[in-house]
Image: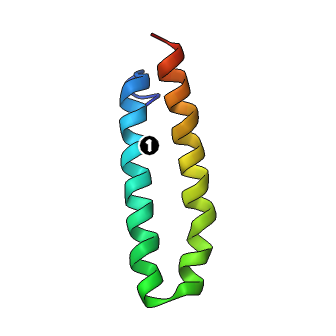
Amino acid sequence: MFFRRRSLAAGLVGTLLLGLGNADLVRRTARADARAAAVLVPYAAWCAFATVLNASLVRRDR
């Protein structure tokens, strides 16, 4: 969304939704297999970092 629509705000919405989906995935996976959930945590953290970077861009580009 960030590149396709050339919109920082749309990219932020996309990364926020991705982060929510990742959190839900880790939570549901942890119910079934704690080790599998632990493997997903670095990806979720990386996506959270991308969200923070994107939010910083939106804030600075006003």
Q: Residue at x 53, y 77 (%)?
A: 37
For the point 61% across and 52% down, which residue is it?
Answer: 46
**Residue that appears at 45% across and 30% down:** 2
Q: Residue at x 42, y 74 (%)?
A: 27
Q: Is residue 43 above or below residue 58?
A: below
Kindly identify the amino acid type of the residue bearing the numbered disc 1: Thr
In the rendered structure, the answer to whether residue 28 lies left or right of residue 34 reads left
Image quadrant in which you'd find residue 34: bottom right
| Element type at mark 1 | helix
Looking at the picture, how far across and down is residue 25, in whole percent?
A: 41, 69
Task: Report x, y in % for residue 18.
Answer: 41, 51
The x, y position of residue 11, in whole percent, is: 42, 32
Quadrant housing the C terminus: top left
* Residue at which label 1 appears: 15
Horizontal side of 9 relative to 44 (left or right) equals: left
Q: Nearer the viewer, residue 1 or 21?
A: 21
- Residue 39 locus on image (x, y percent): 61, 74
How is the model colour-coded? rainbow
Extreme residue in the top direction: 62
Image-quadrant location for residue 31: bottom left
Asked whether residue 34 is in view, the answer is yes
Q: Going by the picture, which residue comes out furthest to the bottom? A: 32
Query: Is residue 1 in sight in this rendering?
Result: no
Q: Is residue 10 above or below residue 38?
A: above
